[in-house]
Image (spheres, grey):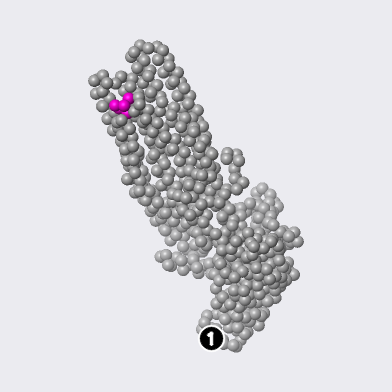
Amino acid sequence: MQIQDLPYPDPGVPDARSGPRFLWWLFRNQLGGQLKSLAWGLLHFASVSALPFCVGLAIQAVVDHSGTRLAVAGGLMVLCCAGNAIGDTFLHRSAITNWITAAARVQQLLARKTALLGSALTRRVAAGEVVAVSTGDVEKIGWFVEAVSRFTAAALTIVLVCVALVVYQPALGVVVLVGLPVLALAVLPLLPRATRRADVQRDKAGRATELASDTVAGLRVLRGIGGEELFLDRYRSASQEVRHAAVRSACMWALISAVQVLLPGLLLIAVVWHGVHLAREGRIEVGELVAVYSSVMILTYPLRHFEEIAMAYSFSRPSAKRAARVLSLERATDTAGSRAAEIPAGDLYDPATGLLAPAGRFTAVVCGDPDAAGRLAERLGGHPSEKGASALLGGVPLDELPLKSARTAVLVQDKDPVLLSGTLRELLDVPASGAVGAEEALAAAQCGDVLAALAQGSLDSEDPMDARITERGRSLSGGQRQRLALARSLITDPEALVLDEPTSAVDSHTEARIAEGVRTLRAGRTTVVFTSSPLLLDRADRIVFLHEGEVVAVGSHRELVRTEPRYRAVVTRETEEETAAHGDGVPAGTGPAKPLTDDGRGGDRDDALSDDDVLHRLEEIEETA
C-alpha cells in the first residue's frame, strides 16, 4: 500500500481484544511495507557499520606501504558510502509510508466504527477520549508500527557486527560481544517506571481534553449561569497536573538517554585501554585497533533504536488500548439483519411499553423521564444501542432489517441534533424521497429568520443556501440550529419520523407555527413527537402518556389534562402539592408552559437553552464545587 492509494478499500477487521494485540494486527496487515523497510534498513546500517573496517584496512595499508590494498580499501569505502546514502533515503521513504498508512488504517477503522455506532458511541465512551484517539493516538500508534522494522534492522546489524569483530580480532571482539548486550539491556529496569509515568501523563491529558471538550460544548450554558470561572479553574488545575506529569515522564526518559550515552562511552574506554595494551605487546595491528574502536563508536547509532522502540511502545501502548476499546464496541443488534432489505409500512409499535403510533397519524408522546424518552425514541428507530424487544413497523421487526433499510423506514431526530460544517445547501443534501423540497421543509420548520441571518452574515453569496455554517453550527443560536435540523429531517420524508423535543429552544409563537407546519407537511405520513409542550400536544391527532415505562393513558390533550393528574403534572409542571390540591377539579392551567410573547431572539428562547439544560448544568456545578 502506497500513500497515493489511500484510503484503503477495506481496512479489515481489527483484533481489538487488547492494545498489544491491536498493534500486532496492524503490523501483520502491512507486512510487505515492513519487509521493505527492513531490507533498506539492513543496507543502511550494514553500510554504516562496514565503514570502520574499511578505515582500518586503509590505515593498515598505509602502515605496510601497500598501494594496492589502499586502493581496495578506498573502493570499499565508496561502496559503503553509496549503500549508506541509498539505504538511508529509501529507509526514510518506506518508514514514513508505513507510519502514514498505519495511522490512516486506524482512522478509517475509527470512522467506520463511529458511523456504525452513531449516537451510542458517546454514551459508552467520553467524547474527549474519542477526540484523543482520532488525533494524537493514531500518530503514536503509527510511530510504533513503523519503528519495529527499523529496530529489527538495527538489532540484526549489531549481531552481525559483533560476529564480524570476533572473527576479525578475537581478543577485542570478545570484549565488544560481552559489552554490547549489557548496553542494550541496561535500560530495561528503567522502562517499567518510565512506562507508568507515561501512562499517567496520557490519562491526565485525556481527562484534560475531555474537560475542555465538555466546557466548549456547554459554553453558552456556562455563560448563562455564570459558571465560566469555575470551569476555567478546573481546566487550569487539570492543565497543571498534565504539566507535572509530563515533566516527571521527561525526567525518566532523560535518565534513559543518559544511560544510553554513558555506557557506550565506558565500553569505548574499555576497548581502547585493552586494545592499546594488546598493540604494545604486538598482538594486534594498528589498523585492527582503529577498526575495532571505530566499530564500537559507530554501533552507538543503531543502539539508539533500542531506546526509540522502548519509547514508541510505551507511548503507543495506552493509545492502542484506547483505540482497541473504541473498536471493540458493538451494536446490540446485527446491522446486517436477518431479513431481506425492504421498506415496510404501517403502524409503528413498541412492545416494551405498549406504544402504538397509527400509520399516517400525528402522535405525541409524553414521558416524565427525559432519559427514558430518549431510549424509547432510539428503540423506535430500530437497532438500538441496548438490547431489548424490537420495535415493529407494519408488523415487521426493525431489528431484523438491515440497518440501512431500518434507517430509511424510520428516521429518529434526537434532542441534540448535530449540524455539520459546510453550506446550507450541503446540509440539506440528504437521502430523501424527493416528495419534499428544501423550501417546503424550511418553511414548515419556520426557518425564515435563519435564512435572513445566514444571508446577512455571508460575504461570498447573497443566496442563504450558499452561506456557510460553522462547525456544529456554533455561529447560530440553539433555536436556529434546532429548526435547521428539523428541516433536514423533514426533507428526508421517511415512512415514519420520530422527533425528540424538536422545539425545546424556540419561543411559543414560533413553536405554534412549527406544530402546524409539521402537521400539514407530514399529512398522511406517520409522525411521532416526544414533547411536553401544550402547543404541540394540542395539535396532535393522538397523545400517548407513559409512566414508569408503560402506556397508562391515550387520548387528546384536553381530555388527558382533565382526567389524568399525572399527565397534567408533567405538561403544566405542577408540584405534587398543587396536583393534590386540584384533585379532579379544574386544572391549574391548560395553556402553554412557555410565554406567549416573542423574546426578541429571532424565534429562540433563553438564548437556545432549555430549562432542563440550565437545571442540569447548575446541579453539575454544585456537585463539583
Q: Is residue 607 above or below residue 33?
A: below
* Residue 173 % position (x, y): 32, 28
Q: Is residue 277 above or below residue 119?
A: above
* Residue 424 % position (x, y): 66, 54
Which residue does the numbered mark 1 point to in the structure image? Answer: 580
Q: Is residue 285 visible?
A: yes
**Quadrant location of the C terminus?**
bottom left
Q: Residue at x 27, y 21 (%)?
A: 283
Q: Is residue 596 above or below residue 7?
A: below
Q: Which residues are magenta?
A: 169-173
Helix, strand or loop: magenta stretch: helix
Q: Is residue 609 left or right of residue 362?
A: left
* Residue 582 % position (x, y): 56, 86
Q: Report the front residue among 124 and 500.
A: 124
Q: Residue at x 60, y 68 (%)?
A: 379
Q: Is residue 273 above or below residue 350?
A: above
- The type of residue carrying mark 1 is Ala
Q: Report the front residue among 553 and 27.
A: 27
**Quadrant location of the N terminus?**
top right
Secondary structure, mark 1, is helix
Reply yes or no: does residue 170 show up in magenta: yes
For the residue carrying disc 1, how many other residues have a C-alpha within 10 Å: few (<14), some (14-19), or many (20+)? few
Q: Report the front residue among 220 and 452.
A: 220
Q: Is residue 124 left or right of residue 51?
A: right
Q: Residue at x 45, y 24 (%)?
A: 80
User: Which quadrant of the structure image shows residue 117?
Assistant: bottom right
